[in-house]
Amino acid sequence: MRNDIEEILIPTEELQAKVKALAAQLTEDYADKDPIFVGVLKGVVMFYSDIVRNFDAPCEMDFMWISSYAGGTTTTGQMNVLRDLTRDISGRHVVILEDIYDTGNSLDFTYKHLLAKGPASLRICTLLDKPARRRAGITLQPDYTGFVIPNRFVVGYGMDYEEHYRNLPYIGVLKPAVYEK
Ligand code: IMP
Ligand code: MG
């Protein structure tokens, strides 16, 4: 598995330092708001668990599962809710946690879906932002961003290529040979 990685883009220590800084900022901003953190599965699992474990105030956890990917490295643009929230978020402060803001199709869809449920506030916290890939017409700006990265397909720390590599503890770029298999 590690032999398939061409380059480590963000090493574990850098990820952990950034996540702690983001969680500290969220703690400051949401200390008395009892926020609901909404994770969009599955890519966000590592980031999500590290954020909430470093969030030092009351909060709730919930998850959504949407389909956006047909597999491989390109989005289809088609969105479906495979699993919706279990909590009622109306009147609550909600923070969407995302692994990566790429074309923006997923976040745009998720944001509108959650906004329609009437939260008191709705913000976005994304670990990675790949602005070069943004689809025209998508104007959402994340309120919290970990790293802005170049236009490369990344894996690890929750993110996959064909469902693999999610368990790598860092964020890396695959060798081209892996795609050619
Ligand atoms: P978007 O809808 O194109 O913004 O991206 C939605 C989802 O695609 C993200 O939440 C990721 O799960 C996945 N994704 C986008 N770019 C990458 C990448 O570089 N590596 C792995 N997954 C990605
Ligand atoms: Mg994915």
Image (spheres, rainbow, N blue to C red):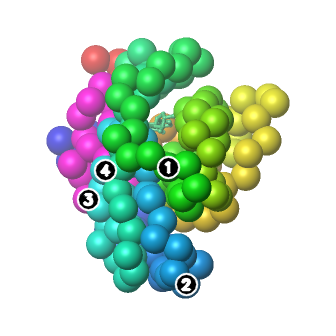
Is 83 above or below relative to 153? Answer: above
Label 3: few (<14), some (14–19) or many (≥20) C-alpha neighbours in 10 Å? some
Task: Report the magenta stretch's main SS.
Answer: loop
Identify the disc placed on residue 169.
3
The amino acid at mark 3 is Pro
Q: Is residue 42 magenta?
A: no
- Disc 2 vs disc 1: which is toward the camera? 1
Q: Residue at x 55, y 84 (%)?
A: 28
Identify the disc placed on residue 127.
none
Identify the disc placed on residue 45.
4
Is 89 above or below relative to 109? Answer: below
Q: Can the viewer see residue 8 in this picture? A: no
CA gap, disc 3 and disc 2:
27 Å
CA gap, disc 3 and disc 4:
12 Å
> Which contiguous range is marked in magenta?
157-171
Compare marks 2 and 1 and give the one earlier in the sequence. 2
Q: Is residue 69 left or right of residue 45?
A: right
Q: Is residue 50 left or right of residue 93?
A: left
CA gap, disc 2 and disc 4:
23 Å
The amino acid at mark 4 is Val
